[in-house]
Structures are given as structure tokens and as C-alpha cells.
Image (cartoon, helix red, strand yellow):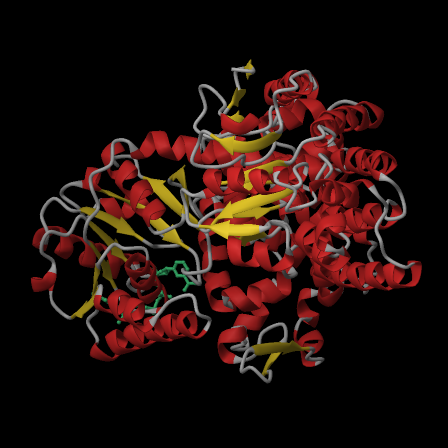
Amino acid sequence: MIYQGNAVSVELLDDGIAELKFDLQGESVNKFNRATLEDLSKATEALKGNDQVKGIVVTSGKKVFIVGADITEFTEMFANDEAEIAKWSRQANDIFNAFEDLDVPKVAAINGFALGGGLEMCLACEFRVMGEAAQVGFPEVKLGIYPGFGGTVRTPRIIGVDNAVEWIATGSQNKADKALKVGIVDAVVKAGDERDAAIDLVKQCLAGKIDFRAKRQEKLDPLPMPPMEQMMAFQTGMAMVQQQAGKNYPAPVEAVKSMQKAAGMKRDDALDVESKGFAKLAKTQQATAMVGLFLADQQVKKVNGKTAKASREVKHAAVLGAGIMGGGIAFQSALKGTPIVMKDINDKALDLGMNEASKLLSKRVSKGKMDAAGMGKVLSAIRPTLSYEDFKDIDVIVEAVVENPKIKQSVLAETEEKVEGAILASNTSTISINRLAEALKKPENFAGMHFFNPVHMMPLVEVIRGEKTSDETVATLVNYAQKMGKNPVVVNDCPGFLVNRVLFPYFAGFSMLVRDGADFQQVDKVMQKFGWPMGPAYLLDVVGIDTGVHAAKVMAEGFPDRMDHDFKDPTEIMFENERYGQKNGIGFYKYEEDKKGKPKKVVDEKTYELIKPAVTSEPKDYDADEIIARMMIPMCTETVRCLEDNIVGSPAEADMAMIYGIGFPPFRGGPLRYIDSIGTQAFVELCDKYAHLGALYEAPQMLKDKAAKGESFFG
Ligand SMILES: NC(=O)c1ccc[n+]([C@@H]2O[C@H](COP(=O)([O-])OP(=O)(O)OC[C@H]3O[C@@H](n4cnc5c(N)ncnc54)[C@H](O)[C@@H]3O)[C@@H](O)[C@H]2O)c1
């Protein structure tokens, strides 16, 4: 044994070939934490001083190669100042350089995921052999940063500018065939053969058949590209990246800038550029939010994992109602491997439900994501029926019939009679779970399971715990949601549950802005620029004006002190004029079909005429900051109230629910992270400034307390 550390070991094999193996003790995967970096440094030192070593293979003792940096260490590290972060990245690069500079052939055997720092480790070798099931890529931009262990320097020198820009700026994860095609790996072999193939490649180098030094030199030199060509390549890359990333995501653009700036430099100078750019990005609000988001996601998964432990096994499911939601739930359940019975009272609805599933599957087949046999299998896992006869051995039943409390109560009670012992869930969006439970003999077996439309696209499921819901019921629904590939968040019962309770105050903010003379289109534009997938008027059209008006009424009844209003609401005017939004082609906007048959929004001047009664002030040109404050304060304060009222268990769950449920801008991290980014004290002051607009703008006690203590939601 040449070296034995906690994460890295080096052993001399036959023929002078050393195996440097990553195997982080006490963890299921390898990652580049501080200790691993130190280990790599010491292992390199040991290799340097050992003249028996003629070549090196780099392997992993885990199923993955190395999944990347240890993101849990980022929060602390990124709290340092920019110079300190740049120094850390540069020191890490010195370790990789020392390894790269070992004057023997080095080959990485990529047996599983080699992502971020994991792939950068492979690039420090002269050659890479990849297993056919492995995947490689640079996901750093998804955390608001870019590769900081030499990735922006070595990648363009190995695979060229165009490919490097694509790989680094998109953060894509790539399969072996693509990796081989661009040349980021040199060979693809059968899974399990990576190590042998890597040893074989080292031997070929030692036999003089391959010039490994020339290969290394390419990585040490400036890019071998004439300046004109270089400029063209980077300009094209930059244009593509700017268009795709948009202004709110600086990391991909910064990555291209750094690669361009360092293109004419030798390795060490180029790495200085990389480290400085990395540190600059690490200090952005986007990096803080996106690293926080990653950690919040892990926390939510951990909470769910714990909750789901008490789950019953879910082998067979059923859904009541084959409409938009029922059909979607059936499709998703079958697609992810839980066969499902789909019951309706209407034959035609069953046909529509099956046709919708069939259409979605055909799309997958035409995109090459599934073959015809796979499609047949999924379709046959959905059993349409008009009768309870088919409800044998069903573990979970999701009710998705029309949104009417009486009908829902009677359907649930009838189902409970027919199917003894199964877990029952309602997909209601506005009816109290406690109220629905009153119709049941065993309310402990009942909870809410709120999916979002379209079910196959939307990642969130709210699991709503009623007063009498048992832990086993919650656990089973969390488990079933996960089996369906969704991200469940468990919440307690209240009007609007979590997501709608927080969304409707935002819509109220919109109505008040229009009342006070704002142009609804300007509000849409500002909020879209802020990062929302669409502005509030457009979102109301997409949700359905009728649905919105109904839900707003429920919210006003539930929280009259702040969600009731005494003015004419523009959304209600749309409703009174039968402008239901996208579903009937007209709402705040008009909808025309584009070439692909998708609805395209166009401006309708008549909207301004119609909403005049809702506007009680002179038209006013609001500046963007005021629009943002008036829209975001009600949403953020209501999220705090949900935490205060124990509707949701933690800030991480609250923020993730808003990102997964309604597309809260991910780079802002969620409503609570957004408050943190402004500062709790500054946010209280912002609330005070607008408190004259009503109770939705008042700072909740929890926020005031945090501000007084100088605390934030995420510490
Ligand atoms: N559409 C959405 O965006 C959305 C989002 C989240 C939740 N929801 C909720 O999901 C539920 C269903 O909504 P939808 O949009 O799918 O409605 P929908 O009108 O498209 O479908 C309802 C279906 O239920 C069937 N049905 C009625 N009574 C039945 C019974 N006794 N047994 C079996 N089937 C019966 C109807 O025939 C119809 O096919 C509602 O509670 C709604 O609030 C809807």
C-alpha cells in the first residue's frame, strides 16, 4: 500500500501500475469534501516520491465514480469573502495540478456518475475510460456557480470550445455515447470492465504505443485556435447561452466569459481566471438561493423518507373520476409502475381519460423515450370501469370527482362502504379535509392528496393531514406520491392548504394594483422579469378565471380579516363576462392557436374597457420595485403565517412547495429565502411601508420576532 487515507488509497498493482481508489468511508457515495481533497493531495505526494510507479489508474470503490463537490460544505465556505473563496478554489486547483503533473500515464476508470468535481478529476488524467451505464457532466450552473476545479480550463482544451460551452453552460448530464462522441472520454466499455480497460490503456502508453505526454501538453497550453476562429466560437456560444439562461442566471454567461478570457493563457494563469470567476459567482444571490434550494430539497426528501417509513405497501391504486385530474393521476400512476383502476359514472369520460393517456404515451414513443411495447404495458395498467366490482385489493383510492362538497362526501362515503380498509384521499383544491372526513366512518384512513394540473408535469403533491388522519395514512400517501415520481410536502388542513393559501394573497396584490391604476400588462411584464414563468393576469387565465374566483371566495371566507375585499375585483369582472381564461379562449388576454396548435396569448383592448369599474384611481406608471413589493409582500407574509400556524413543518418544505407547485423563481429560492435575501428587518420595514394597503401587508409576529433577534429563516 503506497497510501491509505479515509477517502483515497493507493496500491501498487503489477507492472508498476498504481491504483488510486476513491472510497469515502462512512458514505454511500464519493464526493469532494475538504477531507477528500486533502487525501488526494497526500496520495499525490506519496505517488510523486515513489519511483516504482510507472502509471496510474484512478478508480472508485463505490457504484458511482464521484458525484461532485460536497454541497453541504458550500454554505459555510461561500460565507467567506470573494478573495478567500478564490484562494480556496486556487488551492484545490494546485492539488489537481500536482496530480496532473505526475510524469506517468494516468487513466480514469469511470464506472458510474462522474459529475462536477468528479469529472474534473478525470480530466486531470490523460485518458478516460467510461462504462456504458455511467454518466458524466458539469451540473454546477444549476447551483448558480461554474466548475472550479479546472473544468473551465481543461474542458475546452480537450473537447473544443463549442462542446465545452454546451456542456458547462447547460449543466447537462450525459450518457456514454455522447461523451465518446465529443471526446471527453476516450473509450466506452461494458459495465464492470472499466478498471481492466484503464489498466490496458496505461500499458499501451508504457509500451510507447500512445504518446501520453503530448496529450497532457494539450491541457497545459493555450487553446490551439486562431484568434479569429476563437472569437467566432465564443461569440456564438455566448449568444446561445445568453438567450437560454436569461439575465437572472449569471453563471452560464460567466463560464463562457472565463473560458474566453483564459483561452490564450497557459494552464496556471487560466486557472487564476477560473478561480476568480468562481468566487464572484459564489457570492451572488443566485448561488446562495440555488445552493440553499439543493439543501432544502435534500431536507424535504429526508423528512419524507422518515415519514414514509410507516407506509403500507401500495401495490394497486384507484382513482374516482376520469376528468382532467383523474385521467392525469391514472396516467402518472401507471407510468411509474402502480397499476390503477379508473372509475367514472360516465362512459365518455372514461374514453376521454384513456385517450389522453394514449396521447401522452404516443408523444413519448415519438420522442424515442419509450417503445410501443412499453406504451402498451402502461395503457394496460389503467383499468377503466363504471363499477366498484373492479376495486379488489386496492391499497389507495384518490377521489378526483367534481369540486362539490356534497357530491364528494357522498362519493367518499359510498367508496368507504364498498372498499373496506383502503386509504382514501381527496384531490380537492378548496374543500376542507376535516369537513369531508365528517362523512366517513374511519376518518383516520382519509387525507387530502392535492395534485397540480397538468399532473404529469407538475412535481408537487400536497398531502393534507386532517385532524383525524392517522400517521399511517399520511405515510402511505407520501410513499404513493414518491412512487409516482412526485415531491410530496405534508401540510395541515386549512383553507387553500399551503400553496393556494399563499398564492391567493399574491392575486389579491394584483387586484389592488389594478384598482390603484396599474396596467395589468405592465404588472405581468415586471413579474415575469422578476423570474416567474408568467405574470399574475396570465397565470389567472391559465388556472381558469372561474376556478380562481371560486377559490378566492373560499379563501375570503376562511381568512376574512385579510383576504376579503370591499372593492370590485378585475378577476370577478372577467368571470361575470364569461371570460374564463385559456379554457374558453378569452380572459385578461385573448388566445389564438399557434402553428403547433398551442394557445398563444394576444392583447385584447376590450379588457381595459371591461375592468374600468375596478379601477378607482387615475392610471399610474408604477416603477418595477413598487410592483414587486406590492405583489410579493402578501405572498411572503402569508408563507410566514403558514409556518406560524404550523400548516407546514419547516421553511425548507414551504419554499420547496412554492417552487414545485407554482414555479416560484428557483434562483430566488422560495418566499422565505426571498425574505432572507432582503433581510428580515428590512422586510419588516417594507411591510410597514405598505401596511396601509391592508392586513395582507402587515408583518406577522414571527417575522417581527426574527427581525428583532437578527435571525433569518435559513440561519
Ligand atoms: N383542474 C384543475 O386544475 C385541478 C387542480 C387541482 C385539483 N383539482 C380538483 O380535482 C378534482 C377534479 O377536477 P377536474 O378538473 O379533473 O374535473 P373534471 O370535471 O374534469 O372531472 C371530474 C370527473 O368526475 C366524474 N364524476 C362525477 N361524479 C362522479 C362519481 N360519483 N364517481 C366517479 N366519477 C364521477 C365526472 O364524470 C368527470 O369525468 C376537483 O376536486 C378539483 O377541484 C383540479
Give how far across and how far down residue 297 sits, in percent.
Answer: 51, 37
Question: Compared to 325, does 266 lie above or below?
Answer: above
Give how far across and how far down residue 26 sits, in percent.
Answer: 44, 19
- At horizontal 56% and vertical 47% (from top left) the residue drawn is 136
Q: Quadrant of ligand 1?
A: bottom left
| Front-most of residues 628 and 398 | 398
| Front-most of residues 218 and 638 | 218
Give how far across and how far down residue 107 sits, in percent.
Answer: 59, 38
| Front-most of residues 422 and 30 | 30
Whether residue 492 sits left or right of residue 186 in the image: it is left
Camera sees residue 696: no
| Front-most of residues 380 and 646 | 380
Camera sees residue 485: yes
Total tally of numbered discs in the picture: 0
- At horizontal 65% and vertical 46% (from top left) the residue drawn is 210
Question: Compared to 437, does 537 lie above or below?
Answer: below
- Extreme residue in the right direction: 227
Give how far across and how far down residue 262 sits, in percent.
Answer: 86, 44
